[in-house]
Image (cartoon, rainbow, N blue to C red):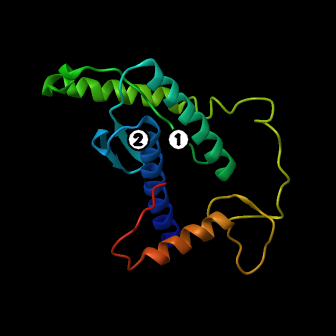
Amino acid sequence: GALKGLKGRSVYVQLLSEAIANNILKKMRLPRSNLIFVGGGNFQIIIPNIAQAKEKIEDIIKKTDEILYSAHNGKICCVIGQRQFSYNHFSSENFAGLISALKTSLAREKRRKFKYKVGSDFFKTEPVGIGECPICGEDIKYVGNDEKCAMCKSFELLSSKIRNCKVIKKFLK
């Protein structure tokens, strides 16, 4: 059970990061070649350094935060670090510094999760369930033979469905 859940979570995070990266490319009208890396819940995209792009990114982050917060009660979020650079940064001696600066930006943003969500309803309390999921600790309303929350059950189901899968077909709107 726990191993299937872990595998399912891993696949979910990978698919989620790919979906967010693809959404950014689509909204910014950028080619797939601007996606430098996607894996392990991370992605790197080259985006033009113009005011409209910065505004679009902020809007995408806000909307993504809303969706993830609603779906996962703040347990999963999208953190995006940004760094301006020029073509000179692609030389071997400058590229390491660029990646280091990007990691610093990302670390700063990780301390500011859901910065667009914090408002009057951010600290509202939800009704407590009658049990607790043994995998993630989430409140659940039913305690019986199958005590896991819906999300953990879905991760196990995802894991079992992709077990012998050779291809995952993605549909992009």
Look at the picture and state if 101 lies above or below 44.
above
The image shows a total of numbered marks equal to: 2
Q: Looking at the image, which is closer to me, 72 or 45?
A: 45
Q: Position of residue 82 (x, y in %)?
A: 41, 27
Neighbor class of circle 2 (other Cα within 10 Å; few <14, some 14-19, many 20+) is: some
Q: Amino acid at mark 1?
A: Cys
Look at the picture and state if 67 lies above or below 15.
above
Mark 2 in CB contact with mark 1 (< 8 angstroms) = no
Work out whether mark 2 precedes mark 1 in sequence or the reverse, and give the earlier one.
2
In the image, taking residue 20 as reference, residue 62 lies left or right, namely: right
Q: Looking at the image, which is closer to me, 25 or 90?
A: 25
Q: Which residue is mark 2?
A: 25
In front: label 2 or label 1:
2
In the image, taking residue 128 as reference, residue 102 lies left or right, namely: left
- x 61%, y 47%: residue: 68
Q: Position of residue 103 (x, y in %)?
A: 37, 30
**C-alpha gap between disc 2 and disc 1:** 16 Å
Q: Position of residue 93 (x, y in %)?
A: 15, 23
Q: Which residue is mark 1?
A: 78
Asked whether residue 164 appears in the rendered view, the answer is yes
Asked whether residue 74 appears in the rendered view, the answer is no
